[in-house]
Image: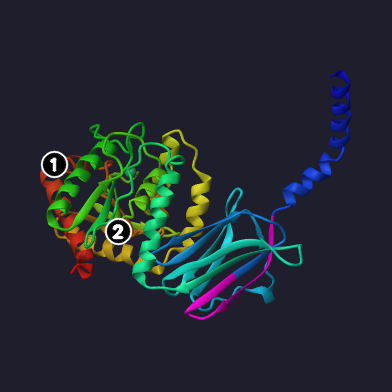
């Protein structure tokens, strides 16, 4: 035994002398994508990309707009000028990059619904490189929807482990119905703003959200979900995830924050933008985005990174829908309650970053204003504003109803 131990020791000392250079190499040794191409037509398209070493991948279908997402081990994309992945056939756009520590992603935006016929990552004949290959055929919308549904069922069973907390199970969408997610801001240890007379934002928005839910259920074919059903803390990430997993058709976050300018009162409708429409909106987004810190969580960098790349990919369609809904809110709310000057604003709110869900954030009023604090708790206000929001949702979906 003693002898064996000793020889091990020598071996370890021997090996360890190589460690510095070996370790360095490991760090710099990410897979490099050095070449790739897209071929085919609108019936059948092939996408491939070559790496200098093996790596793992996973493909996912995504809709709104139709896309194929390829998740990879973190890689370096070193595709020279001549190796540009020129979109063609069923692929209308290609984007790629690192999305977080250890992970990279390729996003193929599709010009039509497709079905993946083959996906593989194999050593090439030259024995020195690996080719990721994806073959897709054009298909109809119904088949694509089926593929999404199957994928959702599969991921539900596998992601249950990864999902922490008590999130709701994804909802099966019924024909002709729309899923609306209402997000009462703050909750639990994160009380949000506090009024001069002690009203807490988390309570006000929760009570109001319940009124909106009722009005919505009365008015149309809406399945209404709330991100929280009680007074509990939820991170922004959880809220976003909830919205996406519920396959929400619309996401409405409700707040009643506080401003330094105590004279400001009335409702404001916010949509997402990279750059704030004005100083006040920028400040507010900053406060809202720090909600996770209040809850004792570090700002989740990964989510930020993912969200950022996705915001870039957010279709003009989602943005347009969000803007349109926000216009309807301004019109309907404006005839019932007081709005602030320039009520349609935008800023980089983290909670609005689901790329495929039209999302708005409503500041019902400002708890820094005593009048607003009183008003937001009155049953008349809640009924009027709640009804105006429900009417706006109905107006929003009317073109898609039969
Ligand atoms: Zn708030």
Nearer to us: label 1 or label 2: 2
**How many residues crowd around disc 1 within 10 Å: few (fewer than 14), some, or many (20 or more)?**
few
Work out whether 42 lies above or below 48.
below
- Rendered image quadrant of residue 204: top left
Residue position for label 2: 249
Ligand 1 located in image quadrant: top left
Q: Is 8 left or right of 316, judged from the image as shown? A: right
Q: Is mark 1 within 8 Å of ligand 1?
A: no
Q: Main secondary structure of the magenta part?
A: strand
Work out whether 272 lies above or below 163.
below
Q: Which mark is residue 320?
A: none
Instruction: Give the magenta range.
Output: 31-47
Please indicate, yes or no, whether residue 354 appears anywhere in the rendered image.
no
Give the Cα distance between marks 1 and 2. Answer: 30 Å
Per the image, label 2 sits on a secondary structure element best described as loop
Q: Is 27 left or right of 168, judged from the image as shown? A: right
Q: Nearer the viewer, residue 189 or 235?
A: 235
Q: Is residue 119 magenta?
A: no
Q: Residue at left 21%, top 62%?
A: 176
Q: Position of residue 42 (x, y in %)?
A: 48, 80
Residue position for label 1: 378
Q: Is residue 44 magenta?
A: yes
Q: Is 257 left or right of 299, judged from the image as shown? A: left
Q: Residue at left 19%, top 43%?
A: 210
Please indicate, yes or no, whether residue 332 appears anywhere in the rendered image.
yes
Q: Which quadrant would the C terminus be assigned to in this image?
A: bottom left
Q: Residue at left 19%, top 49%?
A: 212
Q: Nearer the viewer, residue 199 or 116?
A: 116
**How many residues crowd around disc 2 within 10 Å: few (fewer than 14), some, or many (20 or more)?**
some
Give the mark, 1 or 2, whose residue is nearer the N terminus: 2
């Amino acid at each position: 035994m003693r002898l064996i131990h000793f020889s091990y020791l020598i071996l370890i000392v021997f090996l360890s002398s190589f460690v510095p250079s070996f370790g360095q190499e490991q760090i710099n040794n990410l897979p490099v994508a050095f070449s790739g191409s897209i071929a085919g037509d609108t019936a059948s398209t092939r996408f491939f990309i070559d790496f200098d070493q093996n790596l793992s991948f996973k493909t996912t279908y995504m809709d709104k707009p139709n896309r194929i997402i390829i998740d990879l081990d973190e890689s370096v994309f070193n595709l020279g000028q001549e190796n540009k992945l020129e979109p063609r056939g069923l692929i209308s756009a290609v984007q790629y990059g690192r999305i977080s520590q250890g992970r990279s992603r390729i996003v193929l935006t599709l010009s039509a619904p497709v079905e993946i016929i083959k996906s593989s990552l194999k050593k090439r004949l030259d024995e020195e490189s690996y080719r990721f290959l994806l073959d897709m055929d054009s298909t109809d919308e119904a088949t694509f929807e089926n593929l999404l549904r199957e994928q959702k069922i599969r991921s539900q069973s596998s992601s249950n482990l990864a999902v922490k907390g008590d999130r709701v199970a994804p909802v099966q969408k019924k024909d002709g119905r729309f899923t609306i997610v209402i997000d009462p801001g703050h909750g639990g240890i994160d009380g949000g703003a506090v009024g001069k007379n002690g009203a807490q934002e988390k309570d006000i928005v929760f009570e109001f959200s319940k009124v909106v839910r009722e009005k919505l259920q009365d008015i149309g074919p809406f399945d209404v979900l709330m991100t929280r059903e009680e007074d509990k803390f939820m991170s922004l990430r959880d809220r976003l995830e909830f919205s996406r997993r519920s396959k929400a058709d619309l996401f409405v976050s409700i707040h009643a924050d506080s401003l330094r300018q105590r004279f400001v009162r009335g409702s404001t409708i916010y949509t997402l933008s990279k750059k704030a429409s004005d100083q006040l909106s920028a400040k507010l987004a900053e406060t809202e985005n720090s909600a996770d810190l209040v809850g004792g969580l570090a700002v989740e960098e990964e989510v930020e990174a993912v969200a950022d790349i996705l915001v870039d990919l957010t279709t003009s369609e989602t943005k347009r829908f969000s803007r349109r809904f926000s216009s309807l809110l301004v019109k309907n709310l404006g005839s019932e309650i007081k709005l602030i000057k320039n009520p349609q604003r935008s800023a980089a709110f983290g909670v609005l970053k689901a790329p495929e869900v039209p999302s708005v954030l409503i500041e019902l009023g400002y708890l820094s204003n005593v009048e607003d604090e009183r008003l937001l708790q009155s049953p008349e206000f809640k009924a009027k504003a709640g009804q105006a929001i429900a009417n706006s949702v109905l107006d929003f979906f009317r073109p898609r109803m039969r």
